[in-house]
Amino acid sequence: MKYFFLSEGWAIGQIWTVGGLWNETAWRRTPDIKKMSICLWDKNEQMWLHQVEDAVLMIEIYPTIEVKQSAPNQNIGNVVLTRLINAEKVLEYLSSTSAICQTNQEI
């Protein structure tokens, strides 16, 4: 499994695998991406931990309409995450911060 942190108010767009863009017809399913019940606070941003299957190489993310309206002077259209992290790195991040939040609910 691979992991990444995603700021509250951002959404997942296109997904890439070894053969290019994820093709739901060829794979016969959507990629396995799960928002975990753990987050951390970084510079007043709530960053949620997401788990993704190993076949995924890159993930496009983009701000939702609410984020765009709250920060109209920022012109970020989308970002591609190319460095997904492993479980060891997640534990390293979580152990080095005191601003961790966790929910007991399934996200």
Image (tube, rainbow, N blue to C red):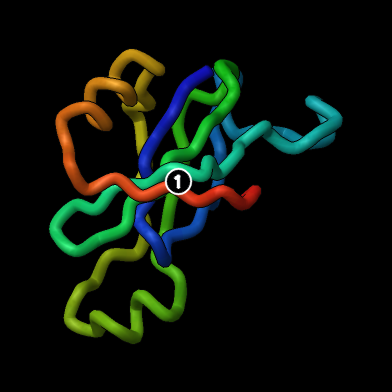
- Relative to 11, residue 100 above or below: above
Where is residue 7? Give x, y as percent: 35, 55
Number of callouts: 1
Q: Which residue in the structure is indicated by mark 1?
A: 60
Position of 103 compared to 29: left or right? left
Position of 63 compared to 33: left or right? left
Q: Quadrant of residue 74?
A: bottom left
Q: Residue furthest front?
A: 104
Q: In front: 1, or 68?
A: 1
Q: Is residue 79 visible?
A: no
Q: Residue at x 17, y 81 (%)?
A: 73
- Relative to 102, residue 58 above or below: above
Where is residue 20? Give x, y as percent: 57, 27
Q: In front: 92, or 17?
A: 92
- Relative to 48, residue 88 above or below: above
Q: Amino acid at mark 1?
A: Glu
Where is residue 64? Give x, y as percent: 45, 71
Tag 1: Cα neighbours inside 10 Å, few (<14), some, or many (≥20)? some
Where is residue 8? Give x, y as percent: 39, 61
Q: Is residue 2 visible?
A: yes
Position of 34 compared to 70: left or right? right
Position of 19 compared to 23: left or right? left
Q: Residue at x 42, y 40 (%)?
A: 49
Q: Residue at x 34, y 78 (%)?
A: 68
Badge 1 marks a residue whose secondary structure is strand
Q: Residue at x 55, y 25 (%)?
A: 56
